[in-house]
Image (tube, grey):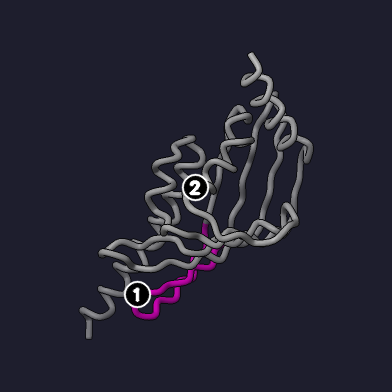
Amino acid sequence: MDYLIKDQKKMEAEIIQAIHTIFEGVDERNRPKVQVIMAEQVMLDYTSLNGGEPNQQTPQEITAIWATFLPGFDKTHHQISDFRVTITGNQAVAHYQGKGNHFLNNEVWTAEGTFNTALEQQDHKWLVTQHKFNLIKQSGNQELPAQAKAVLEKKAAL
């Protein structure tokens, strides 16, 4: 029986590490690091923050969208915690808290909420298949995402 508990704890740790890898990759601006932890198609849902509809996208499409504004910030820092992981066979769902600080020109924009991330074990590796952000609150300068995008557009025009 102990080996089942150890296996469960090991899988939970692998799942949590996979999710941490996404946020680390985002903060490092390391697109391949983010892409390698995602399945071929991911249902991405940031509608609570941006409106619109959830979209099924490839890891390359997701990181390309994020690359249109995230590198325009001086830096970002994401914190995730309070994981609750449910594993059923080769499927898992993780619920956790998240906070993202986005810095530009001595100002900060912060988005806080919860995440629901679904993963599937493929070839002994946990890959993200769904990623949903549930906004609770924003603080700071909420115009910073648009300003970060403008910074990148200005650099591209040079």
Give coordinates of residue 127: x percent, y percent. Answer: 39, 60
Determine whether 9 is above or below 111 in the image: below
Give coordinates of residue 136: x percent, y percent. Answer: 72, 59
Which residues are the magenta region? Answer: 81-96
What is the quadrant of residue 134 in the picture? bottom right
**Residue, disc 2:** 23
Q: Is residue 26 left or right of residue 104?
A: left
* Quadrant of the snapshot with the C terminus: top right
- Give the residue furthest to the top: 158
Residue 97 appears in view:
no
Q: Amino acid at mark 1?
A: Asn
| Residue 89 is one of the magenta-drawn residues | yes
Say whether disc 1 or disc 2 marks the residue closer to the N-terminus: 2
Q: Is residue 102 left or right of residue 142?
A: left
Q: Which mark is residue 90?
A: 1
* Most common SS among magenta residues: strand
Report the front residue among 80 and 47: 47
The residue located at (44%, 76%) in the rendering is 86
The residue located at (47%, 64%) in the rendering is 129
Q: Amino acid at mark 2?
A: Phe
Determine whether 134 is above or below 21 in the image: below
Q: Is residue 111 left or right of residue 123?
A: right
**Dot in front, 1 or 2:** 1
Residue 31 appears in view:
yes
The residue located at (26%, 64%) in the rendering is 123
The residue located at (69%, 61%) in the rendering is 53
Q: SS class of the residue under badge 2?
A: helix
* Quadrant of the snapshot with the N terminus: bottom left
Give coordinates of residue 79: x percent, y percent. Answer: 54, 49
Label 1, residues with CA under 10 Å away: few <14, some 14-19, many ≥20: few
Q: SS class of the residue under badge 1?
A: loop
